[in-house]
Amino acid sequence: MPMPAKAAFYDVDGTLVKTNVVHVYAYYAMNRGSLLGIAGRTLATAASAPLFAAMDAVNRKKFNEFFYRYYAGLSEDRLISVAEDMFEDVLKPALYEQTRDLIDQARRAGCRIVLVTGALDFSMRPLVRHLGADDLIANKMQFVGGKATGKVIPPIIEGANKANAIRSYCVREGLALDQCHGYSDSASDYAMLAVVGRPTAVNPDMRLRSIARAYNWPILDLK
């Protein structure tokens, strides 16, 4: 059966789930290594939370680069293994009730389902399977000797790079970009929404809500 000639691209954090990358890392921090290591990482995450929020608001790219340094030294096998539990404990309960309907609607319209996120790919694989998505565009951690270096393989998936990744994906897969849908909650994803022919603001922040109204984009408020 041939794949659809158009796709629906979904941001994850705040769009499909009520969580963000800090919640995901906090789960890893509390579920690995010795008790001392767990305590240290948990306290470091909690102490850095205000800094994370400030950096994310100012510069998403710098935030991602800084934040993923906290994964340095973690085992690749352990990260993949914990991802399954993290999905059950963190992501699955945080899914908006209407997420499945939003995805099913696009699938019925003949769209390939693609998640586009600044999260790390291994942490999103269980969600991809749960939602029956066809593909994933996400950040990839660099590993050396089975250990995370804390560096993400460029380009970092955020902002304009999300739009570039979507454009490249459509060229590679032979999809009609002007027929594709895009869904996000954040003004930081303006480029991602603007690059597709059919953008939708989902649970938009104040700035994106204003942009969506100005461009007459559909606005959805999921529960």
Image (cartoon, grey):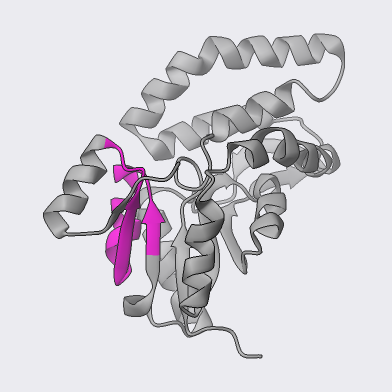
- Would you say residue 183 sits in the magenta stretch? yes
- Would you say residue 101 sits in the magenta stretch? no
Q: Measuring 59% from the left and 50% from the top, which residue is drawn there?
A: 153
Q: Does residue 145 appear in the picture of this structure?
A: no
Q: Measuring 51% from the left and 50% from the top, which residue is drawn there?
A: 117
Task: Answer left or right for 213 relative to 4.
Answer: left
Q: Measuring 66% from the left and 42% from the top, which residue is drawn there?
A: 92
Specify the quadrant that holds the C terminus.
top left
Q: How many marks?
A: 0
- Residue 173, relative to residue 89: is it above or below? below
Residue 2 place in picture, x, y as percent:
61, 90
Of all residues, the one furthest to the left in this rendering is 214
Q: Measuring 85% from the left and 21% from the top, which residue is drawn there?
A: 33
Specify the quadrant that holds the N terminus.
bottom right
Of all residues, the one furthest to the bottom in this rendering is 1
Residue 178 place in picture, x, y as percent:
31, 78
Residue 137 place in picture, x, y as percent:
55, 59
Question: Toward which corner of the image does residue 45 lie, by quadrant?
Answer: top right
Q: Does residue 182 appear in the picture of this structure?
A: yes
Question: Toward which corner of the image does residue 144 lie, by quadrant?
Answer: top right
Task: Answer left or right for 66 relative to 33.
Answer: left
Q: Closer to the camera, 82 or 41?
A: 82
- Residue 222, relative to residue 180: is it above or below? above
The residue range painted magenta reads 182-205
Task: Answer left or right for 177 relative to 206.
Answer: right
Q: Closer to the camera, 142 or 205?
A: 205
